[in-house]
Amino acid sequence: MNDTSPAARLQQLFEGHRLTPTQRRIAHCMVRRAADVPFLSSVELAELAGVSQPSVTRFAVALGFDGYPALRRHLREVAPAEPAEGKQEFTEYQQAVHAEIENLRHLAELLADPGPVERAARLLAASRPLPVLGLRAASSQARGFSYFAAKVHPDVRLLDEGGSMLADRIDAARRAGATALLCFALPRHPREVVEALAYARGAGLTVVTVADSAFAPVAAHSDVLIPAAVGTGLAFDTACAPMLLGRVLLEAMCDDLPDAQARLEEFDVRAAERGLFAD
């Protein structure tokens, strides 16, 4: 895949480095603000990432640079500034929409290599049952995926409530024959999700994760992680890219479920008989 977007170049810069949780937070922030990072001071980047200025310096050194100024010079060389003339001014709401469009564009570039999605889809399609985990902000993503997946997969089990029963439900799915678990993980990342994924892998499940970043806390407990960025321009994050990635996974799963089309046709027949839909 030939991906020359600023976010992709940053991802490549971080690959192969063992980063601390604080450094992953800085990396995640830089990917989200890829176009702005070459022009931010270490203090400004620290404020955006919610870390200390010395942490930014240590992060640059961990990447192999003498300090943050050297890292910033490198970023300016590989991502030269676009001329500001003629740029249109947008409202706050328009900026949020354009940021989501950029997230979707980056997802499209990522999907130029279908390998990770196809691998994930094979794992999920083969799992009987298929547990789907998503807590708090990610619960709607998990629920939406589960609703549609149940139309083509024989046994989908939604795990959208935490608490002491969560491990029990993972155990029950494993005893019933589950081999994989799908997790939607969005910020802020509940500690309970990280713990649940560690538990699921310990129980023998292969974990496929849709997360907002390859540097999310769940990465260490995922066998296959496919990133899809969230929008952060409004008071509450927006998650168009993770939702679309979930539908892409479903599409790929259908290719590995030989009776998927028959199940869909059967549903349509029964829905018509019941007068289920108004249109």
Image (tube, rainbow, N blue to C red):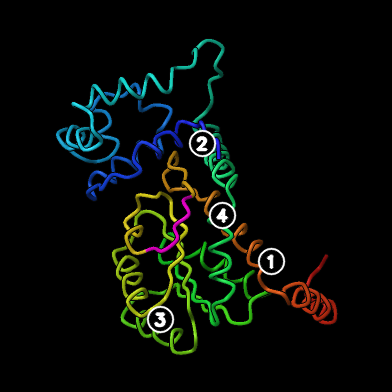
3 or 2: tag closer to the N-terminus: 2
Look at the numbered disc 3 and give the secondary structure of its residue.
helix
Tell me the tag on residue 170.
3
Q: Position of residue 137 (x, y in %)?
A: 43, 59
Considering only vertical position in the picture, is 20 above or below 200? above
Tell me the tag on residue 276.
none
**Viewer-side label of 3, 2:** 3
Q: Is residue 225 magenta?
A: yes
* Amino acid type of the residue tagged 4 in the rendering: Gly
Look at the numbered disc 2 and give the secondary structure of its residue.
helix
Q: How packed is label 2: few (under 14 Cα within 10 Å), some, or many (20 or more)?
A: many
Residue range (magenta): 222-227
* Amino acid type of the residue tagged 2 in the rendering: Ala
Q: Residue at x 62, y 71 (%)?
A: 149
In this picture, residue 246 sits left or right of residue 40: right
What residue is pinned by disc 2?
A: 99
Q: How packed is label 1: few (under 14 Cα within 10 Å), some, or many (20 or more)?
A: some
Q: Residue at x 49, y 12 (%)?
A: 83
Q: Residue at x 63, y 66 (%)?
A: 253
Rounded to the nearest whole Å, what is the CA distance between mark 1 and mark 2?
Answer: 32 Å
Q: Position of residue 146 (x, y in %)?
A: 57, 71
| Quarter occupied by residue 192 | bottom left
| Quarter occupied by residue 9 | top left
Rounded to the nearest whole Å, what is the CA distance between mark 1 and mark 3?
Answer: 26 Å
Look at the numbered disc 4 and give the secondary structure of its residue.
helix
What residue is pinned by disc 1?
A: 255
